[in-house]
Amino acid sequence: MNEVSPATQISEQVVLVTGAARGLGRHIAEAFLREGASVVINYHASAAAAKELAAAHPGRAVALQADVRDRAQVDELFAKASSAFGAPVSTVVNSALVDFSFDGNARPKAEDISFQRFNRQFEGAVGGALNVVQAALADFERAGHGRVINIGTNLFQNPVVPYHDYTAAKAALLSLTRTLAMDLGGRGITVNMVSGGLLRTTDASAATPQEVFDAIASGTPLGSVTTPEELADAVLFFASPWSRAITGQNLVVDGGLVLN
């Protein structure tokens, strides 16, 4: 069995964050930039927001468009990233969220949700993550190690609001996280997941009724709803040398709402 290669310090890494122009992805990108990493800000349609963030960090951030559901676009994304920084991508964070809003009681119910909605979420969460990981393997080999961090949810353990399609896709992503960890560990690549609950507040959770936030806060030991900044800090751990012996794990960051 090959020994897991030690990761470099975050400040020495090139990090790709998908869906990084807005919402949680933007907070994750900002956390890596704060720690000195070079960051690829991937976006699908939010060009202005992505370029604004990159412009605020000249020389250390680049905004690159790609639809993670399209493998050819993802391959081009990695080629441009390596060219921009003159170094391979060593960490990827799969945080892109495809066309979903946490809209509480307005969500499709069991009696009327279509499987097409499930397919849309599977294509984004699982298909997108698979495309990114496969495209990253050559860069990981050049770097001598790799870190994959997938963004999950606590809803498949505690479905306080049954977002059927989103939750099923994230549960499948957890399975992919674990099978990829087993398959890629011998190459010095770790694959982990960070799962938040409802976050206060991102673009996706902006439609959530206040009473849902209040109910979640009252059910946590900390008495609060987790913020995007708090979850982003947990993502940093899995990119750091401190996590070099951890793989295939799902860290729930939700103030203790779900206790593993």
Image (tube, rainbow, N blue to C red):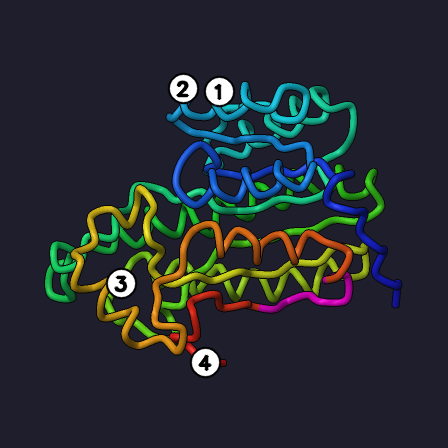
Image marks 1 and 4: residues in contact by CB distance under 8 Å: no
Name the N-terminal-most of marks 3 and 2: 2
Residue at x-position 39% and y-position 44%: 97
Provide the secondary structure element on which disc 3 rests: helix
Give the CA distance from mark 2 to mark 4: 39 Å
Secondary structure of the magenta portion, mostly? loop
Image marks 4 and 3: residues in contact by CB distance under 8 Å: no
Which region of the structure is painted magenta?
243-249
Residue where numbered disc 1 is placed: 51
Report x, y in % for residue 175: 52, 66
On screen, residue 206 above or below 89: below
Residue where numbered disc 3 is placed: 164
Provide the secondary structure element on which disc 4 rests: loop
Residue where numbered disc 2 is placed: 48
Give neighbour class at mark 3: few <14, some 14-19, many 20+ (Cα, 10 Å).
some
**Label 2 amino acid?**
Ala
**Label 1 amino acid?**
Lys
Give the CA distance from mark 3 to mark 2: 32 Å
Residue at x-position 31% and y-position 42%: 203
Name the N-terminal-most of marks 1 and 3: 1
* The N terminus lies in quadrant: bottom right
On screen, residue 159 above or below 38: below
Provide the secondary structure element on which disc 2 rests: helix
Q: Nearer the viewer, mark 3 or mark 2?
A: 2
The residue sitting at the front extreme is 223
**Label 3 amino acid?**
His
The residue sitting at the bottom extreme is 260
